[in-house]
Image (cartoon, grey):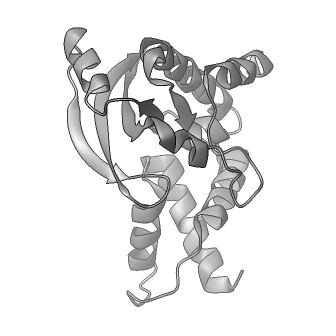
Amino acid sequence: MDTVKSEISSVAARMVVEEGLEFGPAKRRAVKQLGLPGRTALPGNDEIEDAVVEYISVFCADTQPGELLALRRLALVWMERMALFRPYLGGAVWHGTATRLSDIYIQLFCDDSKSAEISLIDHQVDYEPRTVTGFNGESVEALSVHAFCPDLNEEVGVHLLVYDRDDVRGALRPDAKGRTPRGDMAALRRLLHDQQP
């Protein structure tokens, strides 16, 4: 990786960990903060993730494992609540790079796209509908909830991304690093079991 991309990755990683920014906005802010031209070639998400792992190991090694455990426990609670919709956990909470400022991203694979929303209404859960970028770069409906995390003693953003049932096949293809990009409840329970102190 060239020096400029490396510099962008380092600054963006700090923003991801310390401010809870997503990779895209962190990269753009890093370019601006470094005083680089707007058309500067940006590092890929894999490079940002590597820089985040490095940043966490240097600056957050004592706190991040407990924060990750808390977020994974909360994710499992929400996956159990939404079990009818075949939930899969993705993002930083799944990959292990989450901190207390990270949001939880759960993909739901529904027969009827409105059924997850109706379930939240039936259970009197306040949510905010929005459109986000999905795992294939397409626009996806998301139901965003503020959920209290007892282990962190604060609210955490939980985003339920609604996909068609058939989309699950493409969702499980390994990523560029050969990892499973998301996991179901059984996979998350294994991670939690392995992560217990």
Rendered location of residue 35, percent (x, y): 41, 84
**Residue ranking furthest to the top:** 123
Task: For the N terminus, give its image quadrant.
Answer: bottom right
Tell me what residue is drawn at x 66 percent, y 66 percent: 47
Residue 124 visible in the displayed image: no
In the figure, residue 33 lies in which quadrant? bottom left
In the figure, residue 145 lies in which quadrant? top left
Task: Name the foreground residue: 124 vs 155.
Answer: 124
Rendered location of residue 48, percent (x, y): 60, 63
Tell me what residue is drawn at x 44 percent, y 64 percent: 24
Rendered location of residue 154, percent (x, y): 38, 21
Rendered location of residue 75, percent (x, y): 51, 23
In the rendered structure, the answer to whether residue 39 lies left or right of residue 184 reads: left
Residue 140 visible in the displayed image: yes
Looking at the image, how many numbered discs can be counted on the residues? 0
Query: Is residue 38 positioned above or below 196 on the image?
Result: below
Task: Name the foreground residue: 166 vs 46.
Answer: 166
Tell me what residue is drawn at x 31 percent, y 24 percent: 116
Tell me what residue is drawn at x 26 percent, y 18 percent: 120
Task: For the C terminus, give its image quadrant.
Answer: top right
Task: Name the foreground residue: 21 vs 137.
Answer: 137
Query: Is residue 134 positioned above or below 192 on the image?
Result: below
